[in-house]
Image (cartoon, rainbow, N blue to C red):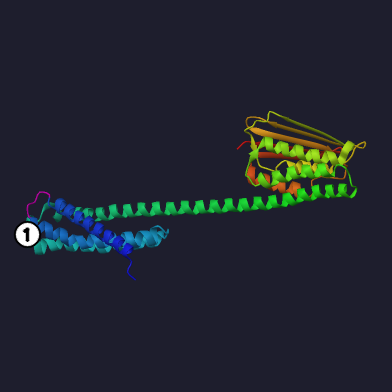
Amino acid sequence: MFNKKNFIKISIRVILHVLFWCGVLLFFMYFFGFDSNDFNFILSFSSFLMPITMATTYLSIYKLIPEYLIKKRYFLFGLYSLYTVIVSGYLIVVSVFYGLIYLSNFQYRNMPPISRNLFFVMIAVYMVTLVVSAFKLLKLNLKQSEQKKKLETKILATQLQLKEQELNYLKMQIHPHFLFNTLNTIYGFSLKKADETPEMILKLSNLLDYLLYQADKPFVLLTEEIQHIKDYIALEHLRFNNTLNVVFNHINTSESDKIAPMLLIPFVENSFKHGSLTNGVLHISIDLTSALDKITFSIENTSSANDTGSKGIGLENIKKRLDLLYNNNYDLNIQHTKGIFKVHLELNHN
């Protein structure tokens, strides 16, 4: 089937090649015509060299370089290059004898000065081959670099897509885990027909609003995350009543500071889930500060000696999310000593 686009492309390439070799012919005539006025000899001699030069050049740029040099088959490249030089050198010698025998009738002195010198004739032929080969090699290297860059970009895009999919999967795990604990609490209150049940449902609706409209964003304002933590603490206050003592300090939190959504709430949730009452009260202390270069979050709660507080989906997911979102730009330290469970997290600003 006729392809007009390919036909035009091939035609342009053929025209460019013809123009180039016409330029080489003119170069040969100028080069070998130095200190000579014998136009017929110069034209015939240059024309005789053209097929040799063209064959050597095309063999180099379409066979030796792409199939051996680029593919790092250096031994075969060197061997076949040597064969090419030997054969082309023989033909160049034949061209000199052609000029001597047929063009100057064995009159050595009638030959143009440069055409008598085999060394200069070889320089003229191989210089064209080397220039074209260098251009071809540069073109192939640029093409290879471009392909490598596209491949690297494709790999990075694939890795990014996989990270996004993993993050979404982790979020999907966090949301049901969080909702399960909260709904379980409301269910317990509803069984008791507690007066706090409607207020708990209202608090839960605020939390759900945050989950639906904020948690899918890559980053949210730190102030929004703080308000989300406050809503969760308020919900837990209704469940614990007078058996809960929570101190939440947040200072130097700028309106422009951002953080990954739902990043801190698993630590807060974990402190309620695994915390233990001491003298009838669960003590939880939360400190959140923001500096120019990092966000610091600390939380500690009273805990029984045999409960590490590090089990469950929440903390495992949060560690994976930290690795994906902050890579080496965070420091997480979890300790459990003398009935106190502590978490200290430092996030470097992106």
- In the image, 337 versus 227, the foreground residue is 227
Residue 247, compared with residue 51, is above or below; it is above
Horizontal placement of 314 versus 61: left or right?
right
Horizontal placement of 126 versus 242: left or right?
left
Residue appearing at x 77%, y 36% in the figure = 299
Q: Secondary structure at mark 1?
A: loop
The quarter of the rendered structure image containing the C terminus is: top right
Residue 72: horizontal and vertical position, in percent?
Answer: 42, 58
* Boundaries of the magenta span: 34-38
Return the residue found at the far top. 252
Horizontal placement of 103 versus 338: left or right?
left
The quarter of the rendered structure image containing the N terminus is: bottom left
Marks counted in the figure total 1
Residue highlighted by disc 1: 107
Residue 290, compared with residue 51, is above or below; it is above
Residue 37 painted magenta: yes
Residue 335, compared with residue 126, is above or below; it is above
